[in-house]
Image: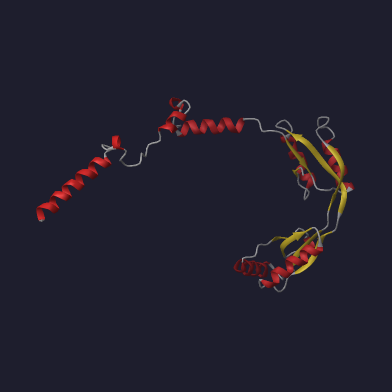
Amino acid sequence: MLRLIVLLLLLANGGFYAWSQGLLQAWGVGPAQQSEPQRVAQQVRPESVRVLSADDMRRVEAQLAQAPRPPECLATPALDETMAGVVRTTVEGWPQGSWSLEPASEPARWIVYMGPYAGVEQVARKRAELRQLGISFEPVGNPQLEPGLSLGSHTGEASAQQQLAGLAERGVRTARVVQERPEQRGVRLLLPAVDDALRPRLEELKTVLSTKPLRPCR
C-alpha cells in the first residue's frame, strides 16, 4: 500500500512539472500564458527611448520655462469712475487693441458671518472650533466687518439663509447673514490677449488696481 502511495505521488509531481513547464500544450493542457506579445508589437520606436540624467532634466525644464506662453484674457472687477480714470491714464500708451474699458457690474454679495470679535485671539479660538466641526471659513472682504469670519458667500440673501439653517443643524449658533457689499456698477479693464510682450507691463497696474486685481475673463 505504501509503495502505491509513493508511486502516485511521483506520478502527480511529474504531471505537475510537465504541466507547469508547458510540456502538455500540444494536448491543450497547460498554465495560462502570462506574456502579452501584442503589446511588444504595438511599441513605436522603442529604441529611441532613453533615461534622462539630472542634468538633462534641468536643461529640459529650462527650455520649457523659456518657451512662449499662450496669450490669456484678463479683466478687472467693476471699477468706479475715479479708479477707471487712473487705469485709463496707465494703459493709454499700450499697443492699440490691447486693452479696453467696458461697462460692468458686480452683483451684491451676502455672507454667512461670524463676528465682529474682540481681537485676534478670539478669532483664533473660533477658527479652532469651526475646524473641529468640519466647517470651512475664509476672511471677510469688507474691512468694516473685521475681525470676523465668512462661512460662505452668495449672490442672494435667500441662499445665504439656507446655508445658515444648514450650519445651525451642525452646531453653529452665533452666525448670521449680512450683506458684505452692495451691487457695484462701473467699468472694467479688459485685456483680451496678454502675451509675453505685454505681461511685463502688468506690473504697472498692480499699485493702481490695489484691491481690484486682474483675473481670468469670465
Give me the residue at 76% from left, 34% from top.
193
Give me the residue at 32% from left, 42% from top.
31
Q: Position of residue 201 (x, y in %)?
A: 75, 35
In this rendering, would 25 be left or right of 144? left
Report the number of numbered marks.
Answer: 0
Identify the image quadrant of the N terminus.
bottom left
Instruction: Tell me: residue 177, above or below residue 88.
Output: below
Identify the image quadrant of the C terminus.
top right
Q: Position of residue 179 (x, y in %)?
A: 81, 63
Instruction: Tell me: residue 155, above or below residue 40.
Output: below
Q: Position of residue 102 (x, y in %)?
A: 87, 41
Front in this rendered view, residue 60 or 82: 60
Instruction: Tell me: residue 88, above or below residue 150.
Output: above
Question: Can residue 67 be seen from the camera position used here?
Answer: yes
Extreme residue toward the right, this view? 81
Tell me where residue 149 sits by quadrant.
Answer: bottom right
Q: Position of residue 116 (x, y in %)?
A: 75, 68
Give me the residue at 86% from left, 40% from top.
101
Colour basis? secondary structure
Instruction: Tell me: residue 43, above or below residue 105.
Output: above
Front in this rendered view, residue 208 or 107: 107
Question: Can residue 114 be seen from the camera position used here?
Answer: no
